[in-house]
Protein backbone atom coordinates (compact mmCIF):
# COMPACT_ATOMS: atom_id res chain seq x y z
CA UNK A 1 0.00 0.00 0.00
CA UNK A 2 1.34 3.42 -0.93
CA UNK A 3 2.39 5.69 1.92
CA UNK A 4 3.28 9.36 1.66
CA UNK A 5 6.73 8.79 3.16
CA UNK A 6 7.75 6.99 -0.04
CA UNK A 7 6.76 9.97 -2.17
CA UNK A 8 8.45 12.41 0.20
CA UNK A 9 11.73 10.49 0.17
CA UNK A 10 11.77 10.09 -3.62
CA UNK A 11 13.51 13.47 -3.98
CA UNK A 12 15.41 15.70 -1.59
CA UNK A 13 13.81 18.69 0.13
CA UNK A 14 16.50 20.90 -1.38
CA UNK A 15 15.88 19.65 -4.92
CA UNK A 16 12.23 20.60 -4.62
CA UNK A 17 13.19 23.94 -3.11
CA UNK A 18 15.48 24.70 -6.05
CA UNK A 19 12.77 23.81 -8.55
CA UNK A 20 10.38 26.30 -6.91
CA UNK A 21 12.85 29.16 -7.08
CA UNK A 22 13.68 28.32 -10.70
CA UNK A 23 10.09 28.94 -11.86
CA UNK A 24 9.81 31.82 -14.30
CA UNK A 25 7.07 34.20 -15.44
CA UNK A 26 5.97 31.85 -18.23
CA UNK A 27 5.30 29.08 -15.72
CA UNK A 28 3.22 31.46 -13.59
CA UNK A 29 1.15 32.64 -16.55
CA UNK A 30 0.58 29.03 -17.63
CA UNK A 31 -0.70 28.12 -14.15
CA UNK A 32 -3.06 31.11 -14.03
CA UNK A 33 -4.39 30.37 -17.52
CA UNK A 34 -4.94 26.73 -16.55
CA UNK A 35 -7.05 27.91 -13.62
CA UNK A 36 -8.98 30.41 -15.74
CA UNK A 37 -9.85 27.60 -18.14
CA UNK A 38 -11.36 25.61 -15.28
CA UNK A 39 -8.76 22.86 -15.54
CA UNK A 40 -7.09 21.06 -12.65
CA UNK A 41 -3.66 22.33 -11.64
CA UNK A 42 -0.67 20.06 -11.15
CA UNK A 43 1.96 20.26 -8.44
CA UNK A 44 4.23 21.88 -11.05
CA UNK A 45 1.63 24.62 -11.49
CA UNK A 46 1.51 25.03 -7.71
CA UNK A 47 5.29 25.47 -7.60
CA UNK A 48 4.98 28.38 -10.01
CA UNK A 49 2.18 30.04 -8.01
CA UNK A 50 4.19 30.06 -4.76
CA UNK A 51 7.45 31.07 -6.42
CA UNK A 52 8.94 34.58 -6.27
CA UNK A 53 8.08 34.89 -9.97
CA UNK A 54 4.36 34.87 -9.07
CA UNK A 55 4.47 37.87 -6.74
CA UNK A 56 3.70 40.43 -9.52
CA UNK A 57 0.59 38.39 -10.42
CA UNK A 58 -0.99 38.51 -6.97
CA UNK A 59 -4.03 40.54 -8.07
CA UNK A 60 -4.80 38.02 -10.82
CA UNK A 61 -4.44 35.15 -8.35
CA UNK A 62 -6.62 36.88 -5.75
CA UNK A 63 -9.44 37.50 -8.23
CA UNK A 64 -9.42 33.85 -9.31
CA UNK A 65 -9.21 32.66 -5.71
CA UNK A 66 -12.25 34.72 -4.77
CA UNK A 67 -14.21 33.39 -7.75
CA UNK A 68 -13.35 29.74 -7.08
CA UNK A 69 -14.09 30.01 -3.36
CA UNK A 70 -17.54 31.53 -3.89
CA UNK A 71 -18.38 28.95 -6.54
CA UNK A 72 -17.66 26.10 -4.11
CA UNK A 73 -18.54 27.53 -0.69
CA UNK A 74 -20.76 30.49 -1.44
CA UNK A 75 -20.42 33.60 0.70
CA UNK A 76 -20.09 31.77 3.99
CA UNK A 77 -17.48 31.66 6.75
CA UNK A 78 -17.46 28.84 9.27
CA UNK A 79 -16.57 29.86 12.84
CA UNK A 80 -14.79 27.70 15.40
CA UNK A 81 -12.82 28.15 18.60
CA UNK A 82 -9.92 26.23 20.19
CA UNK A 83 -10.49 24.75 23.64
CA UNK A 84 -7.21 24.07 25.43
CA UNK A 85 -7.64 21.28 27.98
CA UNK A 86 -4.03 20.86 29.13
CA UNK A 87 -0.59 22.40 28.73
CA UNK A 88 1.18 19.25 29.96
CA UNK A 89 3.76 18.07 27.42
CA UNK A 90 6.42 15.37 27.22
CA UNK A 91 8.18 16.88 24.21
CA UNK A 92 10.98 19.41 23.93
CA UNK A 93 10.25 21.57 20.87
CA UNK A 94 12.30 24.73 20.48
CA UNK A 95 9.44 26.88 19.13
CA UNK A 96 6.57 25.94 21.47
CA UNK A 97 5.43 27.60 24.67
CA UNK A 98 4.28 24.24 26.06
CA UNK A 99 7.73 22.64 25.57
CA UNK A 100 8.65 20.46 28.56
CA UNK A 101 11.80 22.48 29.33
CA UNK A 102 9.90 25.78 29.69
CA UNK A 103 9.34 26.78 33.31
CA UNK A 104 5.62 27.46 33.15
CA UNK A 105 2.79 26.48 35.45
CA UNK A 106 1.21 23.25 34.20
CA UNK A 107 -2.41 22.27 34.50
CA UNK A 108 -4.94 19.82 33.10
CA UNK A 109 -8.63 20.64 33.39
CA UNK A 110 -10.79 18.28 35.37
CA UNK A 111 -14.27 17.44 34.08
CA UNK A 112 -15.96 20.16 36.14
CA UNK A 113 -13.57 22.70 34.62
CA UNK A 114 -14.17 21.28 31.14
CA UNK A 115 -17.90 21.79 31.65
CA UNK A 116 -17.35 25.38 32.80
CA UNK A 117 -15.27 26.07 29.68
CA UNK A 118 -17.98 24.52 27.51
CA UNK A 119 -20.66 26.69 29.06
CA UNK A 120 -18.55 29.84 28.59
CA UNK A 121 -17.81 28.96 24.94
CA UNK A 122 -21.41 28.03 24.18
CA UNK A 123 -22.50 31.45 25.47
CA UNK A 124 -20.29 33.02 22.78
CA UNK A 125 -22.35 31.32 20.06
CA UNK A 126 -20.08 28.47 18.98
CA UNK A 127 -21.32 25.00 18.08
CA UNK A 128 -17.95 23.81 16.73
CA UNK A 129 -14.91 23.47 18.98
CA UNK A 130 -11.35 22.32 18.46
CA UNK A 131 -9.90 20.38 21.41
CA UNK A 132 -6.21 21.20 21.90
CA UNK A 133 -3.72 19.77 24.41
CA UNK A 134 -0.01 19.46 24.89
CA UNK A 135 1.39 16.08 23.94
CA UNK A 136 1.50 14.04 27.15
CA UNK A 137 0.14 10.52 26.78
CA UNK A 138 0.55 9.83 30.50
CA UNK A 139 -1.45 12.87 31.64
CA UNK A 140 -3.72 13.43 28.64
CA UNK A 141 -4.22 10.13 26.89
CA UNK A 142 -7.16 8.21 25.49
CA UNK A 143 -8.88 7.70 28.86
CA UNK A 144 -8.84 11.46 29.50
CA UNK A 145 -10.10 12.21 25.99
CA UNK A 146 -13.03 9.83 26.49
CA UNK A 147 -14.14 11.69 29.59
CA UNK A 148 -13.71 15.14 28.05
CA UNK A 149 -15.52 14.25 24.82
CA UNK A 150 -18.43 12.82 26.80
CA UNK A 151 -18.79 16.16 28.60
CA UNK A 152 -18.33 18.30 25.49
CA UNK A 153 -20.83 16.36 23.37
CA UNK A 154 -23.52 17.67 25.70
CA UNK A 155 -22.82 21.19 24.43
CA UNK A 156 -21.45 21.01 20.88
CA UNK A 157 -22.58 19.27 17.70
CA UNK A 158 -19.11 19.16 16.17
CA UNK A 159 -15.79 18.35 17.84
CA UNK A 160 -12.37 18.50 16.20
CA UNK A 161 -9.10 17.56 17.89
CA UNK A 162 -5.50 18.74 17.70
CA UNK A 163 -3.59 16.53 20.12
CA UNK A 164 -0.64 14.12 19.99
CA UNK A 165 -0.59 11.67 17.05
CA UNK A 166 -2.37 8.44 17.92
CA UNK A 167 -2.60 4.91 16.54
CA UNK A 168 -5.27 3.81 14.08
CA UNK A 169 -7.13 1.91 16.80
CA UNK A 170 -7.14 4.99 19.01
CA UNK A 171 -8.54 7.10 16.18
CA UNK A 172 -11.27 4.51 15.71
CA UNK A 173 -12.14 5.01 19.38
CA UNK A 174 -12.30 8.79 18.91
CA UNK A 175 -14.59 8.35 15.91
CA UNK A 176 -16.89 6.10 17.91
CA UNK A 177 -17.03 8.73 20.68
CA UNK A 178 -18.10 11.41 18.20
CA UNK A 179 -14.93 13.16 17.01
CA UNK A 180 -15.34 14.09 13.35
CA UNK A 181 -12.07 15.78 12.38
CA UNK A 182 -8.40 15.65 13.36
CA UNK A 183 -5.80 18.37 12.83
CA UNK A 184 -2.11 17.50 12.74
CA UNK A 185 0.74 19.66 11.46
CA UNK A 186 4.08 18.30 10.36
CA UNK A 187 5.69 21.65 11.33
CA UNK A 188 8.45 21.19 8.72
CA UNK A 189 8.91 18.52 6.05
CA UNK A 190 12.69 18.94 6.15
CA UNK A 191 13.69 15.67 7.77
CA UNK A 192 17.10 16.86 8.95
CA UNK A 193 15.95 20.21 10.32
CA UNK A 194 12.93 18.57 11.97
CA UNK A 195 15.34 16.85 14.36
CA UNK A 196 16.86 20.23 15.22
CA UNK A 197 13.53 21.56 16.47
CA UNK A 198 12.19 18.40 18.14
CA UNK A 199 14.75 17.36 20.70
CA UNK A 200 12.88 14.94 22.94
CA UNK A 201 9.62 13.03 23.16
CA UNK A 202 7.43 11.15 20.74
CA UNK A 203 7.13 14.18 18.51
CA UNK A 204 10.78 13.67 17.59
CA UNK A 205 9.63 10.69 15.49
CA UNK A 206 9.32 12.35 12.08
CA UNK A 207 7.85 9.35 10.27
CA UNK A 208 5.20 8.54 12.88
CA UNK A 209 3.93 12.12 12.73
CA UNK A 210 4.11 12.20 8.93
CA UNK A 211 1.87 9.12 8.65
CA UNK A 212 -0.75 10.44 11.09
CA UNK A 213 -3.22 11.65 8.41
CA UNK A 214 -3.13 8.17 6.88
CA UNK A 215 -3.97 6.55 10.22
CA UNK A 216 -6.83 9.06 10.56
CA UNK A 217 -8.07 8.05 7.11
CA UNK A 218 -7.73 4.35 7.87
CA UNK A 219 -9.83 4.89 11.02
CA UNK A 220 -12.71 6.33 8.99
CA UNK A 221 -12.69 9.80 10.52
CA UNK A 222 -14.54 12.27 8.31
CA UNK A 223 -11.97 15.05 7.93
CA UNK A 224 -8.28 15.75 8.49
CA UNK A 225 -6.49 19.09 8.59
CA UNK A 226 -2.80 19.43 7.73
CA UNK A 227 -0.24 22.21 7.42
CA UNK A 228 3.23 23.40 8.36
CA UNK A 229 4.51 25.98 10.84
CA UNK A 230 5.37 28.89 8.57
CA UNK A 231 8.74 30.37 9.51
CA UNK A 232 10.63 27.33 10.75
CA UNK A 233 12.21 26.67 7.36
CA UNK A 234 11.79 28.03 3.83
CA UNK A 235 8.04 28.62 3.75
CA UNK A 236 7.65 28.02 0.02
CA UNK A 237 9.27 24.60 0.25
CA UNK A 238 7.30 23.47 3.27
CA UNK A 239 4.06 24.78 1.72
CA UNK A 240 4.79 22.78 -1.42
CA UNK A 241 5.19 19.62 0.64
CA UNK A 242 1.82 20.31 2.28
CA UNK A 243 0.31 20.42 -1.23
CA UNK A 244 2.05 17.14 -2.06
CA UNK A 245 0.60 15.48 1.01
CA UNK A 246 -2.86 16.92 0.33
CA UNK A 247 -2.87 15.52 -3.20
CA UNK A 248 -1.68 12.13 -1.94
CA UNK A 249 -4.37 11.99 0.74
CA UNK A 250 -7.17 13.05 -1.60
CA UNK A 251 -6.31 10.26 -4.00
CA UNK A 252 -6.01 7.62 -1.29
CA UNK A 253 -8.96 8.72 0.89
CA UNK A 254 -11.28 10.18 -1.70
CA UNK A 255 -14.33 10.12 0.60
CA UNK A 256 -12.66 12.33 3.22
CA UNK A 257 -12.72 16.11 3.53
CA UNK A 258 -9.56 18.14 4.02
CA UNK A 259 -8.56 21.47 5.48
CA UNK A 260 -5.38 23.52 5.46
CA UNK A 261 -4.21 26.04 8.03
CA UNK A 262 -1.48 28.68 7.85
CA UNK A 263 0.05 29.13 11.31
CA UNK A 264 2.90 31.61 11.35
CA UNK A 265 5.32 31.58 14.28
CA UNK A 266 4.08 33.76 17.15
CA UNK A 267 5.83 34.99 20.33
CA UNK A 268 5.79 32.40 23.12
CA UNK A 269 7.56 31.29 26.28
CA UNK A 270 11.14 30.31 25.39
CA UNK A 271 11.08 32.35 22.18
CA UNK A 272 10.83 31.19 18.58
CA UNK A 273 13.45 31.59 15.89
CA UNK A 274 11.95 32.65 12.56
CA UNK A 275 14.32 31.26 9.95
CA UNK A 276 12.14 32.12 6.97
CA UNK A 277 10.20 35.37 7.52
CA UNK A 278 6.92 35.57 5.64
CA UNK A 279 5.23 38.88 4.88
CA UNK A 280 1.46 39.32 4.86
CA UNK A 281 1.59 39.76 1.10
CA UNK A 282 3.36 36.42 0.78
CA UNK A 283 0.75 34.79 3.00
CA UNK A 284 -1.94 36.13 0.66
CA UNK A 285 0.01 34.62 -2.24
CA UNK A 286 0.15 31.24 -0.52
CA UNK A 287 -3.54 31.15 0.38
CA UNK A 288 -4.55 32.10 -3.16
CA UNK A 289 -2.15 29.53 -4.60
CA UNK A 290 -3.76 26.77 -2.53
CA UNK A 291 -7.21 27.82 -3.69
CA UNK A 292 -6.20 27.77 -7.37
CA UNK A 293 -4.57 24.39 -6.81
CA UNK A 294 -7.59 22.91 -5.05
CA UNK A 295 -11.05 24.47 -5.13
CA UNK A 296 -12.49 21.89 -2.68
CA UNK A 297 -10.16 22.20 0.29
CA UNK A 298 -11.21 24.24 3.32
CA UNK A 299 -8.78 27.05 4.20
CA UNK A 300 -8.63 28.25 7.78
CA UNK A 301 -7.17 31.49 9.17
CA UNK A 302 -6.60 31.77 12.91
CA UNK A 303 -6.31 34.62 15.38
CA UNK A 304 -2.54 34.43 15.02
CA UNK A 305 -3.07 37.01 12.26
CA UNK A 306 -4.12 40.64 12.72
CA UNK A 307 -7.71 41.84 12.56
CA UNK A 308 -7.01 43.99 9.51
CA UNK A 309 -5.38 41.12 7.64
CA UNK A 310 -8.18 38.69 8.46
CA UNK A 311 -10.82 41.22 7.38
CA UNK A 312 -9.10 41.66 4.03
CA UNK A 313 -8.65 37.92 3.50
CA UNK A 314 -12.32 37.20 4.09
CA UNK A 315 -13.23 37.22 0.41
CA UNK A 316 -9.96 35.93 -1.05
CA UNK A 317 -10.10 32.21 -0.34
CA UNK A 318 -10.54 31.64 3.38
CA UNK A 319 -13.51 29.49 4.41
CA UNK A 320 -13.17 29.27 8.21
CA UNK A 321 -11.93 31.46 11.06
CA UNK A 322 -11.41 31.14 14.78
CA UNK A 323 -12.45 34.05 16.99
CA UNK A 324 -12.06 35.02 20.62
CA UNK A 325 -9.35 32.37 20.94
CA UNK A 326 -7.67 31.58 24.26
CA UNK A 327 -4.49 29.49 24.07
CA UNK A 328 -4.38 28.45 27.72
CA UNK A 329 -6.34 25.80 29.67
CA UNK A 330 -9.32 27.38 31.37
CA UNK A 331 -8.97 30.55 29.35
CA UNK A 332 -12.65 31.14 28.68
CA UNK A 333 -13.81 30.82 32.27
CA UNK A 334 -10.80 32.45 34.02
CA UNK A 335 -8.44 33.95 31.37
CA UNK A 336 -5.14 33.25 33.17
CA UNK A 337 -2.64 34.36 30.51
CA UNK A 338 0.33 32.83 32.35
CA UNK A 339 -0.68 29.44 30.97
CA UNK A 340 -0.99 30.38 27.28
CA UNK A 341 0.85 28.54 24.51
CA UNK A 342 1.40 31.65 22.40
CA UNK A 343 -0.04 35.15 22.13
CA UNK A 344 -2.72 35.85 19.55
CA UNK A 345 -3.03 39.00 17.40
CA UNK A 346 -6.72 39.38 16.59
CA UNK A 347 -8.22 39.86 20.07
CA UNK A 348 -11.76 40.76 18.96
CA UNK A 349 -14.73 38.97 20.47
CA UNK A 350 -16.60 36.34 18.45
CA UNK A 351 -19.52 38.76 18.18
CA UNK A 352 -17.27 41.47 16.76
CA UNK A 353 -15.80 39.07 14.19
CA UNK A 354 -19.26 37.78 13.25
CA UNK A 355 -20.51 41.35 12.84
CA UNK A 356 -17.57 42.12 10.55
CA UNK A 357 -18.28 39.02 8.46
CA UNK A 358 -21.94 39.92 8.06
CA UNK A 359 -21.05 43.53 7.17
CA UNK A 360 -19.18 42.19 4.14
CA UNK A 361 -22.23 40.28 2.90
CA UNK A 362 -21.18 36.86 4.21
CA UNK A 363 -23.15 34.38 6.28
CA UNK A 364 -21.68 33.13 9.57
CA UNK A 365 -21.81 29.36 10.12
CA UNK A 366 -21.30 28.37 13.75
CA UNK A 367 -20.89 24.63 13.12
CA UNK A 368 -19.24 22.43 10.53
CA UNK A 369 -20.68 22.43 6.99
CA UNK A 370 -20.84 18.65 6.79
CA UNK A 371 -23.55 18.66 9.47
CA UNK A 372 -25.76 20.97 7.43
CA UNK A 373 -26.27 24.71 7.63
Image (tube, rainbow, N blue to C red):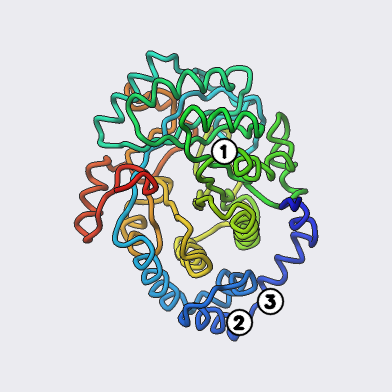
Point 72% across, 30% down: residue: 200
Residue 344 relative to residue 348: left or right: right
- Give the label on residue 22, or none: 3
Q: Check disc 1 and report the residue beneath it.
A: 271
3D distance between C-alphas at marks 3 and 1: 33 Å
Q: Secondary structure at mark 1?
A: loop
Q: Secondary structure at mark 3?
A: loop
Residue 325 placement (x, y as % from top left): 37, 37
Ranked by sequence position, the earlier of labels 1 and 2 is: 2
Please report contact status of discs 1 and 2: CB closer than 8 Å, yes or no: no
3D distance between C-alphas at marks 1 and 2: 38 Å
Q: Nearer the viewer, residue 371 or 94?
A: 371
Residue 136 placement (x, y as % from top left): 61, 23
Point 71% across, 72% down: residue: 19
Q: Quadrant of residue 31?
A: bottom right
Please report contact status of discs 3 and 1: CB closer than 8 Å, yes or no: no
3D distance between C-alphas at marks 2 and 3: 10 Å
Residue 177 relative to residue 172: left or right: left
> Viewer-nearest of labels 3 and 1?
3
Amino acid sequence: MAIFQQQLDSQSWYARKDSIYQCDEAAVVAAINQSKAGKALSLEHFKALISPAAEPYLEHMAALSQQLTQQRFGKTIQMFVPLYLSNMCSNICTYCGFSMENKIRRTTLDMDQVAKEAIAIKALGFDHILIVTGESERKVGLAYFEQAIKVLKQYFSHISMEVQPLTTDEYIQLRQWGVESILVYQETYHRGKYAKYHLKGRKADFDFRLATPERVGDAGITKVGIGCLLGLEDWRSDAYHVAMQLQFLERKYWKMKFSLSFPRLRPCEGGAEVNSPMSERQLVQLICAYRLFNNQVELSLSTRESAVFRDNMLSLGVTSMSAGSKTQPGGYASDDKSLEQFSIDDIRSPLAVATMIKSKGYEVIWKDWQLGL
